[in-house]
Image (cartoon, grey):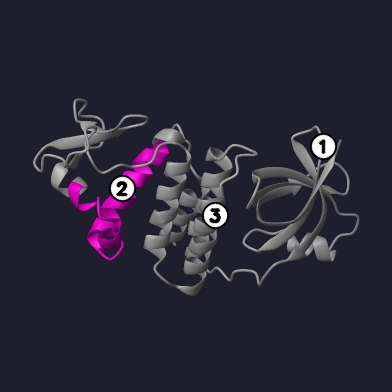
Amino acid sequence: MAQLRAGEPGFILHAHPYKEHCRLLEAFTLNYGRVCLYARLPQKGSRQQALLQPFCPLQLTMLQGRSEIWQLTECSRAGEPLALKVPQLFSAYYLNELIYFLLKRGDAAPKLFACYLSALRSLADGGAQEAALRLFELELLQHLGQGLDFHTADGNAFIPHNLYCYLPGRGFVQQTDPELRAFDGRTLNALANTAVVLQDPQLLQTLKQITRTCLSLLLHGRELKSRQMYQQYLQL
């Protein structure tokens, strides 16, 4: 029996045409994680069609049936659309791509949803953007069971002058393969204090290298369009 999920906070990640007068949507919701929806849009330029855009906080009413594709029956704005300008817009699309490619449908992630909203707000208002992005990446890795622990397997500090690489499911291990990106133990020890890291631009940059390395492994080398757009923007 179909169940109605009313007033669910969410954001649209991606939308494309689906059959006649319909649109297929990927949404990120507070209580149901990533959800695939179809919406009937009988008129071009309708109010609902204008709402179904990324980075606009929404309240979604969804009809859940047997199929993994739910029906969007109603939506309303839950706040003002976040005013994202270039190049911050590329970072926002980067967050959307990570959720789309790495979060399974129906995998509820309320803490990640909160980090996503916080990161979007930081990008929109020009706040601590790098810190917000790193916090989102760390929470995503934690949710995926790949959380970063800046300690050795036995809970000790790293040996400062040794080199370590990250392996999914194992964490940081002493480097044996020179082709894998390595980080020295002194830096990994410094990264154990998140509060300090978020205030230190150099440590934030190192953390960025680490989180991107971990996420790249989980993406299996998939190129993200948001990064391509950002590189093209830099070349203008």
| Residue 54, position as x, y percentages in the image | 64, 58
Pointer 1 with pointer 2, Cβ within 8 A? no
Label 2 to label 3: alpha-carbon separation: 19 Å
Q: Is residue 106 visible?
A: yes
| Residue 73, position as x, y percentages in the image | 84, 52
- Amino acid under disc 1: Gly
Q: Is residue 97 magenta?
A: no
Instruction: Tell me the number on the disc at residue 93.
Output: 3
- Amino acid under disc 2: Gln
Q: Earlier in the sequence, mark 2 or mark 3?
A: 3
Q: Secondary structure at mark 1?
A: loop
Instruction: Tell me the number on the disc at residue 65.
Output: 1
- Amino acid under disc 3: Tyr
Q: Earlier in the sequence, mark 1 or mark 2?
A: 1
Q: Which residues are magenta?
A: 189-216
Q: Secondary structure at mark 3?
A: helix
- The image shows residue 104, relative to residue 22, as above or below, that is above
- The quadrant where residue 3 appears: top right
Task: Between residue 151 and residue 54, name the one nearer to us.
Answer: 151
Task: Between residue 95 and residue 191, name the one nearer to us.
Answer: 191
| Residue 190, position as x, y percentages in the image | 19, 52
Task: Between residue 57 and residue 46, name the one nearer to us.
Answer: 57
User: Residue placed at 55% from the left, 39% from the top?
Assistant: 101
Q: Which circle, 1 or 2, is nearer the viewer?
A: 1
Main SS, magenta region, reads helix
Q: Secondary structure at mark 2?
A: helix
User: Residue placed at 46% from the left, 60% from the top?
Assistant: 233
Label 1 to label 3: alpha-carbon separation: 29 Å
Residue indicated by mark 2: 209
Mark 3 crowdedness (10 Å alpha carbons): few <14, some 14-19, many ≥20: many
